[in-house]
Amino acid sequence: MDATTRTVNVAIPGGTLPFEVLADDAIIGPAIAKGSWADDETALMCAHLGKGQRMVDLGGNVGWFAVQAILAGAEVDCFEPVPAIAAVAARNVAAANERGPGKGRVHEFAAGAERGEASIVLSTANHGDNRVVEGDTPADLGDAERLTIQIAPVDDFVKGPVRFLKVDTQGSEWAALQGCKQLLADSPELGLLLELWPYALRGATAEELLAFLDDEGFVLGKATNGPYPMTTARILAQVGNAADVKGGIDLYGTRRRPFHVLGTKARLRGMWRSLKET
């Protein structure tokens, strides 16, 4: 892949922070260049974090969420398996470490159930859509480049408790969660961001993944600026199916933590959406 970067300035309290993005990225890079990325998800995560708390970022890409957590005061472990992208994330995390008040580190691994190697397919345009595959390249990725990467359980690197877990691994979410069962057990009060994309999901169905999270005690909803708790049936009705490449949903969840963390207006937006949406 072309790992050429450009540096943009991101507004932070008290000034700006230089942040590297991949120069030819079609999605994440341009959004950050305009000032931010994944605003709703970022706000939900930061509302759960403060000085001295801990966050784990699985599928860190260039480090946006890790950097925001560091600036919120958290200690961050960020996992990104593609070497060229992990190097960019490490530089962004190092820059955030200089500004603090939190600290972060980057692990060049994909989060999985056990140690090993795997093939990852690198999207030619959206450098946030790199997928671990078993067999042929997904049809929607065409003749994309493949790399061999390292996989390891999060439990080998991070010991709980942590306050927040983000899992956005382009279909490897089930495997990632199987490799952090001890972390989950040691983190009774936990916030969660997780991408549920049935088309790319490996190792389990969407129903099985949601059942696992329900058994773990999470209250789930969509990661929006007005989230509301959703039943499994309601999530499945909105998420699409395994044949739909455009399906998928970003989920927000909490366990033994308040679900509504963005204030009264956000809670009212959530109530309105819960009545409007099917």
Image (cartoon, rainbow, N blue to C red):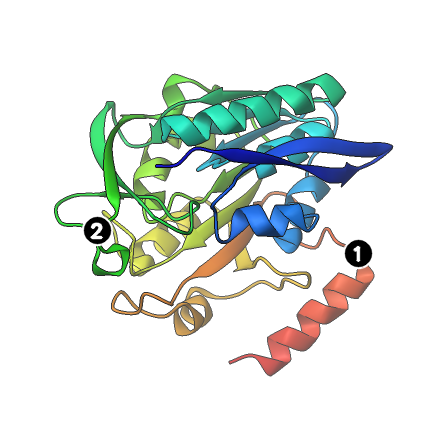
Expressed as whole percent of the image width and height from the top left, the position of residue 102 reads 70, 22
Q: Name the residue located 68 percent from the left edge and 64 percent from the top edge.
A: 226
Secondary structure under the numbered disc 2 in the rendered image: loop
User: What mark, if any, has residue 175 been given in the picture?
Assistant: none
Residue 207 to residue 187: above or below: below
Q: Amino acid at mark 1?
A: Gly
Secondary structure under the numbered disc 1 in the rendered image: loop
User: What mark, if any, has residue 143 been given in the picture?
Assistant: 2
For this orientation, the residue located farthest to the left is: 135
Residue 128 to residue 111: above or below: below
The residue that disc 1 covers is 263
Q: Residues within 10 Å of mark 2 (few under 14, many from 20)?
A: few
Residue 102 to residue 188: above or below: above
Would residue 103 be seen by someone viewing this image from the given angle? no
User: In the image, 237: left or right of 67?
Assistant: left
Q: Name the residue located 34 percent from the left edge and 52 percent from the top edge.
A: 209
Q: CA distance from mark 2 to mark 1?
A: 46 Å
User: In the image, 112: left or right of 14?
Assistant: left
Which of the two residues, 47 or 29, is positioned nearer the viewer here? 29
The quadrant where residue 232 appears: bottom left
The quadrant where residue 269 appears: bottom right
Q: Residues within 10 Å of mark 1 (few under 14, many from 20)?
A: few
Expressed as whole percent of the image width and height from the top left, the position of residue 159 reads 48, 19
Expressed as whole percent of the image width and height from the top left, the position of residue 3 reads 43, 33
Expressed as whole percent of the image width and height from the top left, the position of residue 216 reads 44, 44
Q: Name the residue located 38 percent from the left edge and 31 percent from the top edge.
A: 181
Q: Amino acid at mark 2?
A: Asp
